[in-house]
């Protein structure tokens, strides 16, 4: 059955995606995925950190069904009750003074729209907003502006100026394992933050509309910045009068052990981009802004045909309810701490493990050919991924050098299942390390 499908897909679907696993998904429940040939896998990647509640959570499915029976789309020219209810709910759980929300369809749209809003904000203050500061190693999406913000060359090949939006400046990634040699982690974090100030004051082509950061760099390789970094960035932004945009598309909704990852460092952004887990498995993005920033927005400044899609809003409200009631952020913190501990112990015995890092259930294992040179080992990461798949586990691989094994399972994963999966992963890394 699968081979017939692959032939059909190859014939009619545009072949622009990265290489995909040979899995034709037939059904999924909880942390399990079953393919069209009847094989069952344990999902340790959550659809790229999206299915935080697992697959087809009954409360989310029920909310979707109830709303779908009423109406599924009305466009942004009309109101519906769920948009205000969800916006109010997000305001109640968001950090700082984020109080108003625009709904869109994806993380790319959320980040792109966040920058647009900061440029309008700059204009309202008599500034040009000519420059946006982002980080090397970051990832913010795959369309023009968000690709320009993305600080990784591999995503921009053959695209020319499409991925080189004017005015984007990249500063040092807070990637201590690879770039912090010779200084303490705390000092390295301060230096990375101070480079942002330097860009604002000395190197930007005109005034700066925004500084855009991921609190933990996801596609960059689960890069957790030094604890000194984000608070100092937030302080610099306040002092320079530049809005701080936090991209929580991958880190939001309990993934890192807090509802939002920036809360680990008590950072209150001016603008926050959301997507992935927000929709409970359906496509939904959001831009949250502070009251101060919202004053720069006028009717007609932004629009989206599928704004606050009612079915997606119903799913999001159900997902947030489950997240809160079942304390899934705290659960992610507890299970993630144990997984990180075991992986750290394995690091001492397996020479190919260069670094283990993460928060909550957002964990990266960086594989290297030589610990002293830190030469990346992307082929080892792929071998680990393949071996885990043979064992019935789905993991991710990413990072700037494609050498980071990514663990981002549903937050509902049972402790014993997480323990067993960690053991299997350690065994796979031990075996591939000896090859």
Image (cartoon, helix red, strand yellow):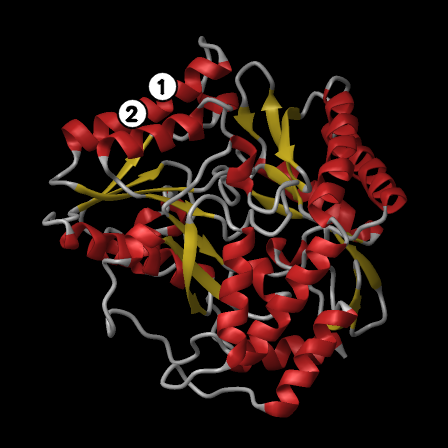
Q: Foreground residue, 102 or 411?
A: 102
Query: In the rendered image, is residue 19 in sight?
Result: no
Classify 214 as above or below 121. above
Q: Position of residue 323 (x, y in %)?
A: 69, 55
Q: Which residue is mark 1?
A: 191
Task: Pick the residue in front: 158 or 60.
Answer: 60
Position of residue 85 measured from the top left corner of the image (x, y, whole percent): 54, 70
Q: Residues within 10 Å of mark 1 (few under 14, many from 20)?
A: some
> What quarter of the picture does the N terminus occupy?
bottom right
The residue drawn where x is 29% and y is 70% is 302
Left or right of 196 in this view: 19? right
User: In this view of the protein, can residue 268 be seen by the observer?
Assistant: yes
State the CA–CA distance, disc 1 to disc 2. Answer: 6 Å
Give the quarter of the image for residue 421: top right
Q: Residue at x 77, y 24 (%)?
A: 346
Residue 85's disc is: none
* Residue at the far top in the pictured view: 182
Disc marking residue 195:
2
Q: Secondary structure at mark 1?
A: helix
Residue 341: x %, y % from top left: 76, 26
């Amino acid at each position: 059955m699968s081979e017939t499908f692959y032939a059909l897909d190859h014939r009619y679907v545009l072949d622009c995606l990265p290489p995909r696993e040979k899995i034709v998904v037939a059904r999924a429940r909880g942390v399990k995925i079953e393919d069209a040939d009847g094989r069952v896998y344990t999902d340790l990647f959550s659809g790229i950190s999206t299915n935080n509640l697992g697959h087809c959570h009954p409360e989310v499915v029920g909310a979707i069904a109830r709303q779908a029976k009423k109406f599924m789309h009305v466009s942004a020219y009309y109101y519906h009750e769920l948009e205000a209810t969800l916006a109010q709910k997000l305001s109640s759980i968001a950090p700082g003074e984020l109080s108003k929300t625009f709904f869109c369809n994806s993380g790319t749209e959320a980040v792109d729209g966040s920058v647009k809003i900061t440029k309008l904000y700059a204009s309202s203050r008599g500034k040009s907003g000519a420059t946006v500061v982002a980080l090397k190693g970051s990832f913010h999406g795959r369309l023009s502006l968000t690709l320009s913000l993305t600080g990784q060359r591999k995503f921009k090949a053959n695209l020319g100026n499409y991925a080189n939006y004017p005015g984007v400046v990249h500063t040092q990634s807070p990637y201590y394992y690879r770039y912090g040699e010779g200084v303490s982690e705390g000092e390295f974090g301060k230096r990375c933050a101070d480079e942002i100030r330097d860009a604002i004051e000395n190197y930007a082509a005109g005034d700066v509309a925004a500084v855009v950061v991921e609190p933990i760099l996801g596609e960059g390789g689960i890069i957790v910045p030094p604890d000194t970094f984000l608070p100092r960035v937030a302080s610099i932004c306040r002092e320079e009068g530049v809005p701080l945009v936090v991209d929580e598309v991958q880190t939001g909704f309990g993934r890192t052990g807090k509802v939002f990852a920036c809360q680990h460092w008590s950072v209150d952004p001016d603008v926050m981009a959301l997507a992935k887990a927000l929709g409970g498995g359906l496509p939904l993005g959001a831009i949250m802004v502070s009251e101060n920033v919202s004053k720069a927005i006028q009717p007609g400044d932004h629009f989206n045909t599928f704004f606050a899609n009612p079915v997606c809003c119903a799913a999001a409200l159900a997902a947030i309810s489950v997240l809160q009631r079942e304390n899934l952020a705290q659960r992610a913190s507890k299970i993630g701490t144990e997984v990180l501990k075991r992986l750290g112990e394995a690091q001492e015995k397996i020479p190919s493990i260069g670094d283990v890092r993460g928060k909550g259930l957002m964990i990266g294992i960086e594989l290297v050919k030589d610990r002293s040179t830190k030469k990346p080992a992307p082929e080892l990461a792929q071998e680990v991924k393949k071996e885990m798949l043979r064992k019935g586990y789905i993991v991710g691989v990413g990072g700037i050098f494609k050498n980071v094994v990514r663990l981002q399972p549903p937050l509902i994963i049972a402790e014993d299942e997480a323990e067993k999966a960690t053991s299997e992963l350690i065994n796979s890394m031990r075996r591939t390390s000896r090859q």
